[in-house]
Image (tube, rainbow, N blue to C red):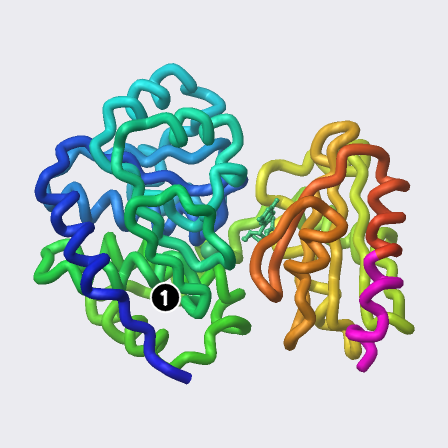
Protein backbone atom coordinates (compact mmCIF):
# COMPACT_ATOMS: atom_id res chain seq x y z
CA UNK A 1 0.00 0.00 0.00
CA UNK A 2 1.29 3.45 -0.89
CA UNK A 3 1.84 6.31 1.51
CA UNK A 4 -0.51 9.24 1.29
CA UNK A 5 0.86 12.61 0.19
CA UNK A 6 -1.13 15.83 0.02
CA UNK A 7 -0.72 17.82 -3.18
CA UNK A 8 1.80 20.66 -2.62
CA UNK A 9 -0.22 23.14 -4.72
CA UNK A 10 -3.25 22.65 -2.49
CA UNK A 11 -1.14 23.14 0.62
CA UNK A 12 0.20 26.43 -0.81
CA UNK A 13 -3.35 27.59 -1.52
CA UNK A 14 -4.44 26.80 2.05
CA UNK A 15 -1.34 28.54 3.40
CA UNK A 16 -2.30 31.65 1.44
CA UNK A 17 -5.90 31.54 2.72
CA UNK A 18 -4.62 31.24 6.29
CA UNK A 19 -2.22 34.12 5.96
CA UNK A 20 -4.85 36.38 4.32
CA UNK A 21 -7.89 35.41 6.39
CA UNK A 22 -8.99 36.59 9.80
CA UNK A 23 -12.28 34.79 10.49
CA UNK A 24 -12.44 31.06 10.07
CA UNK A 25 -15.24 28.55 10.44
CA UNK A 26 -14.71 24.80 10.61
CA UNK A 27 -17.72 22.62 9.78
CA UNK A 28 -18.49 18.94 10.10
CA UNK A 29 -21.45 16.75 9.16
CA UNK A 30 -24.86 16.05 10.68
CA UNK A 31 -24.89 13.55 13.57
CA UNK A 32 -21.21 14.25 14.19
CA UNK A 33 -19.04 11.26 15.09
CA UNK A 34 -15.58 10.97 16.62
CA UNK A 35 -13.89 11.81 13.34
CA UNK A 36 -16.10 14.85 12.71
CA UNK A 37 -15.53 16.31 16.19
CA UNK A 38 -11.90 15.15 16.49
CA UNK A 39 -10.81 16.50 13.11
CA UNK A 40 -12.69 19.80 13.39
CA UNK A 41 -11.54 20.64 16.92
CA UNK A 42 -7.96 19.71 15.99
CA UNK A 43 -7.98 21.98 12.94
CA UNK A 44 -9.55 24.80 14.98
CA UNK A 45 -6.82 24.36 17.60
CA UNK A 46 -4.16 24.64 14.91
CA UNK A 47 -5.74 27.78 13.40
CA UNK A 48 -5.92 29.39 16.83
CA UNK A 49 -2.19 28.85 17.29
CA UNK A 50 -1.89 30.93 14.12
CA UNK A 51 -3.82 33.70 15.95
CA UNK A 52 -6.98 33.32 13.89
CA UNK A 53 -10.56 33.71 15.07
CA UNK A 54 -12.10 30.29 14.69
CA UNK A 55 -15.57 28.83 15.28
CA UNK A 56 -16.50 25.17 14.93
CA UNK A 57 -20.08 24.54 13.83
CA UNK A 58 -21.88 21.22 13.40
CA UNK A 59 -25.52 20.81 12.34
CA UNK A 60 -26.76 19.07 15.51
CA UNK A 61 -25.70 17.63 18.85
CA UNK A 62 -22.93 15.04 19.23
CA UNK A 63 -22.76 12.11 21.67
CA UNK A 64 -21.73 12.51 25.31
CA UNK A 65 -18.75 10.17 24.84
CA UNK A 66 -17.04 12.91 22.79
CA UNK A 67 -17.63 15.72 25.21
CA UNK A 68 -14.34 15.22 27.05
CA UNK A 69 -12.42 16.24 23.91
CA UNK A 70 -10.38 19.40 24.25
CA UNK A 71 -12.50 22.32 23.05
CA UNK A 72 -15.58 20.15 22.44
CA UNK A 73 -17.54 22.55 24.66
CA UNK A 74 -16.82 25.34 22.18
CA UNK A 75 -18.45 23.50 19.28
CA UNK A 76 -21.65 25.29 18.24
CA UNK A 77 -24.69 23.39 17.00
CA UNK A 78 -26.53 25.06 14.14
CA UNK A 79 -29.93 23.70 15.19
CA UNK A 80 -29.66 25.50 18.54
CA UNK A 81 -27.97 28.75 17.44
CA UNK A 82 -29.13 29.37 13.88
CA UNK A 83 -28.87 33.17 13.90
CA UNK A 84 -25.46 33.28 15.52
CA UNK A 85 -24.13 30.56 13.19
CA UNK A 86 -25.53 32.28 10.09
CA UNK A 87 -23.75 35.48 11.14
CA UNK A 88 -20.47 33.60 11.69
CA UNK A 89 -20.78 31.89 8.29
CA UNK A 90 -21.55 35.20 6.57
CA UNK A 91 -18.54 36.88 8.19
CA UNK A 92 -16.11 34.04 7.49
CA UNK A 93 -13.13 34.53 5.18
CA UNK A 94 -12.50 30.81 4.96
CA UNK A 95 -14.75 27.84 5.71
CA UNK A 96 -13.16 24.44 6.20
CA UNK A 97 -15.54 21.57 5.40
CA UNK A 98 -14.48 18.43 7.24
CA UNK A 99 -15.62 14.80 6.98
CA UNK A 100 -18.38 15.48 4.43
CA UNK A 101 -18.25 16.41 0.76
CA UNK A 102 -21.75 17.52 -0.15
CA UNK A 103 -23.95 20.29 1.29
CA UNK A 104 -26.70 17.70 1.62
CA UNK A 105 -24.74 16.29 4.59
CA UNK A 106 -24.96 19.46 6.70
CA UNK A 107 -28.74 19.83 6.83
CA UNK A 108 -30.27 23.29 7.07
CA UNK A 109 -26.79 24.85 7.31
CA UNK A 110 -26.17 23.91 3.66
CA UNK A 111 -27.94 26.98 2.30
CA UNK A 112 -25.88 29.42 4.38
CA UNK A 113 -22.66 27.67 3.36
CA UNK A 114 -23.61 27.58 -0.31
CA UNK A 115 -24.38 31.31 -0.39
CA UNK A 116 -21.31 32.57 1.48
CA UNK A 117 -18.57 34.60 -0.20
CA UNK A 118 -15.95 32.78 1.88
CA UNK A 119 -13.38 30.46 0.36
CA UNK A 120 -14.38 26.86 0.95
CA UNK A 121 -11.75 24.24 1.66
CA UNK A 122 -12.69 20.57 1.66
CA UNK A 123 -10.75 18.05 3.75
CA UNK A 124 -12.49 14.69 3.53
CA UNK A 125 -12.20 10.97 2.80
CA UNK A 126 -15.59 10.13 1.25
CA UNK A 127 -16.19 9.20 -2.37
CA UNK A 128 -17.40 11.57 -5.07
CA UNK A 129 -17.19 15.12 -3.69
CA UNK A 130 -19.55 17.79 -5.00
CA UNK A 131 -17.99 20.47 -7.16
CA UNK A 132 -18.43 23.36 -4.73
CA UNK A 133 -15.07 23.82 -3.04
CA UNK A 134 -12.23 26.23 -3.86
CA UNK A 135 -9.61 23.79 -2.62
CA UNK A 136 -10.45 20.13 -2.47
CA UNK A 137 -8.45 17.64 -0.43
CA UNK A 138 -10.43 14.48 -1.02
CA UNK A 139 -8.51 11.28 -0.26
CA UNK A 140 -10.66 8.17 -0.01
CA UNK A 141 -7.65 6.09 0.97
CA UNK A 142 -7.28 8.03 4.24
CA UNK A 143 -8.53 6.17 7.30
CA UNK A 144 -10.23 9.29 8.60
CA UNK A 145 -10.51 13.02 8.07
CA UNK A 146 -8.43 13.36 11.24
CA UNK A 147 -5.55 11.65 9.44
CA UNK A 148 -5.87 14.20 6.63
CA UNK A 149 -5.96 17.14 9.05
CA UNK A 150 -2.78 15.84 10.63
CA UNK A 151 -1.13 15.61 7.22
CA UNK A 152 -2.30 19.07 6.17
CA UNK A 153 -1.06 20.67 9.39
CA UNK A 154 2.26 18.84 9.10
CA UNK A 155 2.61 19.92 5.47
CA UNK A 156 1.76 23.54 6.27
CA UNK A 157 5.11 23.75 7.99
CA UNK A 158 6.63 24.08 11.40
CA UNK A 159 3.89 24.57 13.92
CA UNK A 160 3.61 24.63 17.66
CA UNK A 161 0.15 23.11 17.26
CA UNK A 162 1.26 19.49 17.22
CA UNK A 163 1.08 19.02 20.96
CA UNK A 164 -0.92 16.67 23.18
CA UNK A 165 -4.17 18.67 22.84
CA UNK A 166 -4.03 18.46 19.08
CA UNK A 167 -2.87 14.84 19.19
CA UNK A 168 -5.75 13.72 21.43
CA UNK A 169 -8.30 15.09 18.97
CA UNK A 170 -6.55 13.61 15.91
CA UNK A 171 -6.10 10.23 17.57
CA UNK A 172 -9.78 10.14 18.55
CA UNK A 173 -10.83 10.69 14.94
CA UNK A 174 -8.47 8.02 13.63
CA UNK A 175 -9.44 5.53 16.33
CA UNK A 176 -13.21 5.95 16.00
CA UNK A 177 -13.34 5.84 12.19
CA UNK A 178 -11.37 2.58 12.12
CA UNK A 179 -13.16 0.83 15.00
CA UNK A 180 -9.96 1.08 17.05
CA UNK A 181 -7.87 0.13 13.97
CA UNK A 182 -9.92 -2.94 13.15
CA UNK A 183 -10.82 -1.82 9.60
CA UNK A 184 -9.76 0.70 6.91
CA UNK A 185 -6.38 0.89 8.60
CA UNK A 186 -3.92 -1.37 6.79
CA UNK A 187 -1.61 1.38 5.54
CA UNK A 188 1.65 1.45 7.43
CA UNK A 189 1.91 5.24 7.33
CA UNK A 190 -1.12 5.44 9.65
CA UNK A 191 1.06 3.96 12.38
CA UNK A 192 3.88 6.39 11.65
CA UNK A 193 1.41 9.19 12.37
CA UNK A 194 0.33 7.45 15.55
CA UNK A 195 3.95 7.19 16.65
CA UNK A 196 4.26 10.96 16.16
CA UNK A 197 1.07 11.57 18.11
CA UNK A 198 2.29 9.35 20.95
CA UNK A 199 5.46 11.42 21.16
CA UNK A 200 3.39 14.36 22.39
CA UNK A 201 2.64 12.34 25.53
CA UNK A 202 -0.95 11.28 24.88
CA UNK A 203 -2.26 8.12 26.54
CA UNK A 204 -4.10 6.15 23.85
CA UNK A 205 -5.46 3.64 26.38
CA UNK A 206 -7.17 6.42 28.31
CA UNK A 207 -8.60 7.84 25.07
CA UNK A 208 -9.97 4.38 24.23
CA UNK A 209 -11.66 4.12 27.61
CA UNK A 210 -13.07 7.66 27.46
CA UNK A 211 -14.76 6.84 24.16
CA UNK A 212 -15.69 3.17 24.40
CA UNK A 213 -16.05 2.62 28.18
CA UNK A 214 -18.35 5.51 28.71
CA UNK A 215 -21.78 4.01 28.18
CA UNK A 216 -24.87 4.44 30.29
CA UNK A 217 -26.70 1.57 31.98
CA UNK A 218 -29.54 2.26 29.53
CA UNK A 219 -27.24 1.63 26.60
CA UNK A 220 -26.17 -1.75 28.03
CA UNK A 221 -29.79 -2.77 28.52
CA UNK A 222 -30.68 -1.56 25.05
CA UNK A 223 -27.80 -3.64 23.68
CA UNK A 224 -29.09 -6.74 25.47
CA UNK A 225 -32.61 -6.16 24.16
CA UNK A 226 -31.41 -5.57 20.61
CA UNK A 227 -29.24 -8.68 20.47
CA UNK A 228 -31.86 -10.90 22.10
CA UNK A 229 -35.02 -9.63 20.50
CA UNK A 230 -34.28 -7.44 17.52
CA UNK A 231 -31.51 -9.11 15.57
CA UNK A 232 -32.46 -11.14 12.48
CA UNK A 233 -29.85 -13.12 10.62
CA UNK A 234 -30.46 -13.92 6.95
CA UNK A 235 -28.00 -16.83 6.74
CA UNK A 236 -28.66 -17.62 3.10
CA UNK A 237 -27.63 -14.05 2.22
CA UNK A 238 -24.83 -13.68 4.80
CA UNK A 239 -26.63 -10.62 6.12
CA UNK A 240 -28.16 -9.34 9.34
CA UNK A 241 -30.77 -6.76 10.25
CA UNK A 242 -31.55 -4.84 13.43
CA UNK A 243 -34.69 -2.73 13.70
CA UNK A 244 -35.43 -0.27 16.49
CA UNK A 245 -38.70 1.61 16.60
CA UNK A 246 -39.22 5.02 18.17
CA UNK A 247 -41.24 3.37 20.94
CA UNK A 248 -38.45 0.87 21.70
CA UNK A 249 -35.88 3.64 21.88
CA UNK A 250 -38.09 5.57 24.31
CA UNK A 251 -38.50 2.42 26.41
CA UNK A 252 -34.74 2.37 26.98
CA UNK A 253 -34.49 6.18 27.18
CA UNK A 254 -31.96 5.97 24.35
CA UNK A 255 -29.89 9.16 24.28
CA UNK A 256 -27.71 10.47 21.46
CA UNK A 257 -24.91 7.96 20.89
CA UNK A 258 -26.61 5.07 22.68
CA UNK A 259 -27.15 3.19 19.42
CA UNK A 260 -23.60 3.91 18.18
CA UNK A 261 -21.71 0.76 17.19
CA UNK A 262 -24.70 -1.62 17.42
CA UNK A 263 -24.78 -2.05 13.64
CA UNK A 264 -21.19 -3.34 13.65
CA UNK A 265 -21.90 -6.17 16.06
CA UNK A 266 -23.67 -8.63 13.72
CA UNK A 267 -20.47 -8.66 11.62
CA UNK A 268 -18.95 -10.64 14.50
CA UNK A 269 -21.24 -13.56 13.57
CA UNK A 270 -19.48 -16.17 11.48
CA UNK A 271 -20.44 -15.76 7.83
CA UNK A 272 -22.18 -12.38 8.14
CA UNK A 273 -20.74 -9.90 5.64
CA UNK A 274 -23.41 -7.21 5.58
CA UNK A 275 -25.26 -5.62 8.48
CA UNK A 276 -28.09 -3.10 8.50
CA UNK A 277 -29.70 -1.18 11.32
CA UNK A 278 -33.00 0.64 10.83
CA UNK A 279 -33.64 3.17 13.57
CA UNK A 280 -36.83 5.20 13.82
CA UNK A 281 -35.38 8.46 15.15
CA UNK A 282 -38.68 10.30 14.98
CA UNK A 283 -42.00 8.73 13.99
CA UNK A 284 -42.03 8.33 10.23
CA UNK A 285 -38.29 8.87 9.69
CA UNK A 286 -36.03 5.83 9.68
CA UNK A 287 -32.30 6.32 9.89
CA UNK A 288 -30.35 3.63 8.02
CA UNK A 289 -26.86 2.44 8.98
CA UNK A 290 -25.04 -0.11 6.85
CA UNK A 291 -21.78 -1.96 7.48
CA UNK A 292 -19.92 -4.62 5.49
CA UNK A 293 -16.64 -6.48 5.31
CA UNK A 294 -14.27 -7.10 2.41
CA UNK A 295 -15.41 -5.65 -0.88
CA UNK A 296 -19.18 -5.68 -0.39
CA UNK A 297 -20.23 -2.14 -1.35
CA UNK A 298 -22.72 -0.97 1.23
CA UNK A 299 -22.41 2.57 -0.15
CA UNK A 300 -24.02 1.30 -3.37
CA UNK A 301 -26.86 -0.25 -1.38
CA UNK A 302 -27.23 3.03 0.55
CA UNK A 303 -27.46 5.03 -2.68
CA UNK A 304 -29.80 2.65 -4.50
CA UNK A 305 -32.20 1.76 -1.70
CA UNK A 306 -31.91 4.40 1.02
CA UNK A 307 -31.14 7.73 -0.70
CA UNK A 308 -27.73 7.93 0.98
CA UNK A 309 -24.12 6.99 0.46
CA UNK A 310 -20.83 6.77 2.33
CA UNK A 311 -17.83 4.49 2.35
CA UNK A 312 -17.48 1.00 0.87
CA UNK A 313 -17.80 -0.64 4.30
CA UNK A 314 -19.75 1.98 6.28
CA UNK A 315 -22.59 3.97 4.88
CA UNK A 316 -26.03 5.27 5.63
CA UNK A 317 -29.21 6.84 4.42
CA UNK A 318 -32.84 7.48 5.35
CA UNK A 319 -36.30 6.15 4.73
CA UNK A 320 -39.41 8.29 5.14
CA UNK A 321 -42.28 5.94 5.99
CA UNK A 322 -43.03 3.02 8.24
CA UNK A 323 -40.58 0.49 9.66
CA UNK A 324 -42.33 -2.18 7.59
CA UNK A 325 -41.58 -0.23 4.43
CA UNK A 326 -37.93 0.23 5.46
CA UNK A 327 -37.63 -3.54 6.08
CA UNK A 328 -39.08 -4.13 2.61
CA UNK A 329 -36.38 -1.89 1.13
CA UNK A 330 -33.74 -3.90 3.00
CA UNK A 331 -35.17 -7.19 1.71
CA UNK A 332 -35.25 -5.81 -1.81
CA UNK A 333 -31.57 -4.88 -1.44
CA UNK A 334 -30.77 -8.42 -0.25
CA UNK A 335 -32.58 -9.89 -3.23
CA UNK A 336 -30.58 -7.73 -5.62
CA UNK A 337 -27.21 -8.31 -3.95
CA UNK A 338 -27.61 -11.93 -2.82
CA UNK A 339 -25.17 -13.23 -5.38
CA UNK A 340 -22.46 -10.76 -4.40
CA UNK A 341 -23.04 -11.52 -0.74
CA UNK A 342 -22.73 -15.26 -1.12
CA UNK A 343 -19.98 -15.63 -3.69
P1 LIG B 1 -23.61 5.94 10.44
O1 LIG B 1 -24.14 4.59 10.18
O2 LIG B 1 -22.54 5.92 11.48
O3 LIG B 1 -24.68 6.95 10.66
O4 LIG B 1 -22.90 6.40 9.09
C1 LIG B 1 -21.79 5.73 8.60
C2 LIG B 1 -21.16 6.51 7.48
O5 LIG B 1 -22.07 6.53 6.40
C3 LIG B 1 -20.93 7.97 7.80
O6 LIG B 1 -19.65 8.15 8.30
C4 LIG B 1 -21.08 8.62 6.47
O7 LIG B 1 -19.88 8.52 5.78
C5 LIG B 1 -22.05 7.76 5.74
N1 LIG B 1 -23.44 8.25 5.70
C6 LIG B 1 -24.40 8.09 6.62
N2 LIG B 1 -25.56 8.61 6.23
C7 LIG B 1 -25.35 9.12 4.98
C8 LIG B 1 -26.16 9.81 4.04
O8 LIG B 1 -27.36 10.05 4.23
N3 LIG B 1 -25.55 10.20 2.88
C9 LIG B 1 -24.24 9.94 2.62
N4 LIG B 1 -23.72 10.36 1.47
N5 LIG B 1 -23.46 9.30 3.48
C10 LIG B 1 -23.99 8.88 4.66
MN1 LIG C 1 -14.76 10.17 8.79
Q: Which residue is mark 1?
A: 204
Q: Is residue 84 left or right of residue 154?
A: right
Magenta run includes residue 327:
no
Question: Residue placed at 67% from the left, 38% from the top?
Answer: 254
22 and 216: which is toward the camera: 22
Question: Residue placed at 34% from the left, 46% from the top?
Answer: 40
Q: Is residue 216 left or right of residue 61?
A: right
Q: Is residue 270 left or right of residue 229?
A: left
Question: Residue placed at 10% from the left, 39% from the top?
Answer: 20
Q: Secondary structure at mark 1?
A: helix
| Residue 207 seen from this side | no
Name the quadrant of the C terminus: bottom right
Question: Residue placed at 28% from the left, 71% from the top?
Answer: 5
The 10 Å Cα crowd at callout 1, few under 14, some 14 to 19, many 20 or more, is some
Q: Position of residue 239 (x, y in %)?
A: 81, 67
Q: Position of residue 292 (x, y in %)?
A: 68, 67
| Residue 87 seen from this side | yes
Give the extent of the magenta segment: 333-343
Taken as a whole, is the magenta stretch helix, strand or loop? helix
Check mark 1 vs ligand 2: CB closer than 8 Å? yes or no. Answer: no
Magenta run includes residue 338:
yes
Q: Position of residue 331 (x, y in %)?
A: 88, 56
The quadrant in which residue 71 appears is: top left
Q: Is residue 292 left or right of residue 78?
A: right
Amino acid sequence: MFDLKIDAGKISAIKEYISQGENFVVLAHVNPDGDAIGSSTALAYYLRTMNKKVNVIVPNAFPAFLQWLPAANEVKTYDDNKEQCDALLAAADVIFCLDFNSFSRIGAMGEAVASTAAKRVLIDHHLAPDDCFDVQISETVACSTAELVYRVVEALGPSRAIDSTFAEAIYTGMMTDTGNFAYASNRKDIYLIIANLMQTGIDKDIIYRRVFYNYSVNRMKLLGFVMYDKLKVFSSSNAALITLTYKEMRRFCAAKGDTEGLVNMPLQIKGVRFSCMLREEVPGKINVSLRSVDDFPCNKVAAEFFGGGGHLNASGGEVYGTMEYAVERFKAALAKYKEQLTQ
